[in-house]
Image: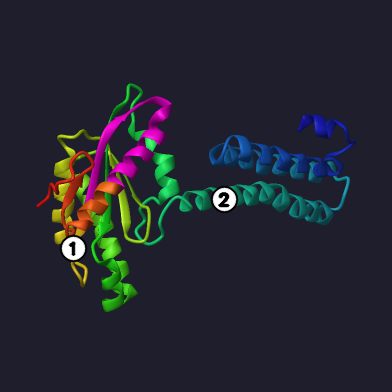
């Protein structure tokens, strides 16, 4: 700022040079974020206040002219970085919303792909995938209306959350299709049957107008390092196939990918 003033013969003439602070503000928004921007804006206001007072003291222009110049420059220099910050925030919120299903507020398929690697520690772990499908969901929609169908979807989503929360299991839950859900759980083959049982129980307690049932397919495997997305996709395919076997024997049960015999009945 002193360099800017040094280029001019008086503070009034130098005041437009403070517009360069807007460029600094944009840089801070992009690189550093909101808190450093707040400090920068305080500095900007202080700089304008000091130069305004110096301009009045030097008496090189009418006070009204000095005031008008201040009122023109200050909102612009402060406002431009704030507008850019608001725009970037809106973009980030939009990017986050793009990862979630708007009805159930679960992750969607894209969100599942983005989040699942966070379940796996550096040394790898057993992951279990539960593929969940609401039994006879089309009949619910046709017989009771889409509003009821939506409430059933939300109830099953909440039941999935409750099932993993009750076991304190780390998980990623997503709605991957119309009435299809996927749970990726940091759990091995001994724990995942209990997750499935808890899910059946939670669905049975749903407070929806129509209490649904679900078919669940389960697959378990090891995941580590950069191979996590590939491993999870393979587990989802196996769990999906098991889920269709569960539906094929009447639904409302769990089938393991390693066993064609329903495990929940």
Check if residue 74 falls in the magenta segment. no
Q: Residue beneath label 1, please?
A: 206
- Foreground: disc 2 or disc 1: 1
Where in the figure is residue 167, as x and y percent of width and height?
Answer: 17, 41
Which secondary structure, mark 2?
helix
Residues tagged 2 and 1 counted as in contact (Cβ below 8 A): no
Give the residues in magenta: 216-240
Q: Which quarter of the image is occupied by the N terminus? A: top right
Residue 105 as seen in the image, left or right of residue 186: right
For image coordinates 87% across by 32% down, the residue present is 7
Where in the figure is residue 207, as x and y percent of width and height?
Answer: 19, 66
Q: Is residue 3 above or below residue 130?
A: above
Q: Is residue 129 above or below residue 248?
A: above
The crowd level at tag 2 (other Cα within 10 Å; few <14, some 14-19, many 20+) is few
**In the image, which disc is placed on residue 91?**
2
Q: Nearer the viewer, residue 2 or 199?
A: 199
Q: Earlier in the sequence, mark 2 or mark 1?
A: 2
Residue 161, can we see it?
no
């Amino acid at each position: 700022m002193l360099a800017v003033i040094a280029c001019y013969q008086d503070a009034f003439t130098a005041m437009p040079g403070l517009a360069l602070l807007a460029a600094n503000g944009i840089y801070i928004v992009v690189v550093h974020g909101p808190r450093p921007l707040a400090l920068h804006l305080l500095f900007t206001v202080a700089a304008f206040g000091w130069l305004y007072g110096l301009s009045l003291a030097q008496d090189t222009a009418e006070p009204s002219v000095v005031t008008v110049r201040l009122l023109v420059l200050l909102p612009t220099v402060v406002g431009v970085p704030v507008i850019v910050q608001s725009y970037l925030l809106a973009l980030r919120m939009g990017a986050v919303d793009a990862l979630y299903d708007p009805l159930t507020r679960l992750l969607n398929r894209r969100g599942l792909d983005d989040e699942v690697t966070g379940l796996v520690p550096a040394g790898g772990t057993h992951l279990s995938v539960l593929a969940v499908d609401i039994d006879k969901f089309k009949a619910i929609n046709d017989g009771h209306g889409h509003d009821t169908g939506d409430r059933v979807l939300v109830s099953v989503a909440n039941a999935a959350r409750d099932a993993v929360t009750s076991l304190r299991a780390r998980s990623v839950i997503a709605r991957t299709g119309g009435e299809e859900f996927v749970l990726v759980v940091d759990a091995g083959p001994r724990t995942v049957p209990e997750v499935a049982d808890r899910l059946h129980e939670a669905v049975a307690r749903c407070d929806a107008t129509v209490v649904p049932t679900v078919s669940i397919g389960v697959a378990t495997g090891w995941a580590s390092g950069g191979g996590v997305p590939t491993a999870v996709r393979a587990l989802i395919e196996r769990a999906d196939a098991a889920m269709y076997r569960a539906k094929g024997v009447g639904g409302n049960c769990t089938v393991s990918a390693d066993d064609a015999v329903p495990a929940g009945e």
